[in-house]
Amino acid sequence: MAPPGPPSQGPPLFPPVRELPETSPETRFLPEALPKPSLRAWPSSVVPAGSSVTLRCGTPTRDVSVALRKVGSVWEMVQSPNSTEGQAEFHLSDVKSSHAGEYTCKYHRRGNPHVSSGPSDALLLLVTGYLRKPSLQAHRSGAVTEGQEVTLQCQRPATELGPVMFALLKAGSAAPVQVRPSAGRETDFSLLSVSAGDSGNYSCVYYQARAPFRASQASPRLEIRVAASPPSIASDYTTGNHIRLALAAAIMVIAGAFLLEAWCTQRHVRGESG
């Protein structure tokens, strides 16, 4: 009896490797042909659950297609921007915690999808209302004048655990004024050399430092009023000197006028007597 032959070979587990044609360094390392776009949120990148937000991708060139991507997700939206403004708008309505996260946008020329821009800087969208609200208070009470420093402390409830970030918000601003890590249950926000433009209503939120980026309710608002600084003593002294110099000049002019009038009168009298 003949010895058994070698076992039959089945189909290979992996397809054979196909050698790719050699490419030149120029095609292997193409520089970015298009500058990266910008990405902003309106009315704000921190919005309450159930509201709407618009993400605006600004492109420096026209006749392009824009893609909005959520980092860590296959979700994507494509749109052509306004031909006159070079800006594509992506509307998100009835936002939920699943909408929170980092977004980027990029674009490519129509008809040439192989030439695209780099991604924009990441925009973190926070949807508030999923953790208990913090408190916000100012270290300094009373009136605040221009040039002073204002420190606001945001404190989260003791029951909330885990690493979080704090964001200071100002009503009417499209982005947080400041973002800081927690120092225990609270963190301090410092507004240096405040001016009248810093007046307004402030609040704060805290949120998870990593996905899913669950965010708290906003704290009650705290109003900051910045008054104009009183004039300094040196300014008063200079103003007083200016006033005194002006009065002295006016007196000299009046005295000169009287002397001129007396001289003219005396000359006229001498002329008549002669």
Image (tube, rainbow, N blue to C red):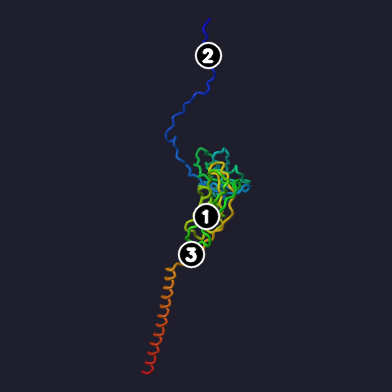
Secondary structure of residue under mark 3: loop
Residue 204 rendering spot, x and y as whole percentages: 56, 51
Asked if residue 73 is positioned above or below residue 83 in the image, the reply reads above
Q: Position of residue 50 (x, y in %)?
A: 63, 47
Q: Which residue is mark 1?
A: 152
Q: Amino acid at mark 3?
A: Ser
User: Looking at the rendered structure, which numbered label has been put on residue 44?
Assistant: none
Q: Amino acid at mark 1?
A: Leu
Q: Badge 2: few (under 14), some or many (20 or more) residues near its Cα, within 10 Å?
A: few
Mark 1 element type = strand
Badges 1 and 3: C-beta atoms under 8 Å apart? Answer: no
Image quarter of residue 28? top left
Chain-order first, disc 2 or disc 1: 2
**Crowdedness near tag 3: few (<14), some (14–19) or many (≥20) residues, C-alpha within 10 Å:** few
- Camera-side residue of 152 and 120: 152
Which residue matches tag 3?
Answer: 229
Q: Position of residue 202 (x, y in %)?
A: 55, 55
* Nearer to the camera, 70 or 101: 101
Label 1 or label 3, whichever lies nearer to me, is 1
Q: Earlier in the sequence, mark 1 or mark 3?
A: 1
Separation (CA) of disc 3 from disc 2: 95 Å
Q: Which residue is mark 2?
A: 7
> Mark 2 or 1, which is nearer the eye?
1
Q: Contact (CB < 8 A) between labels 3 and 2?
A: no
How far apart are labels 1 and 3 at the CA level? 21 Å
Question: What is the three-letter code of the residue carrying label 2?
Answer: Pro
Which quarter of the picture shows residue 244? Answer: bottom left
User: Vertical placement of 256 versus 63: above or below?
Assistant: below
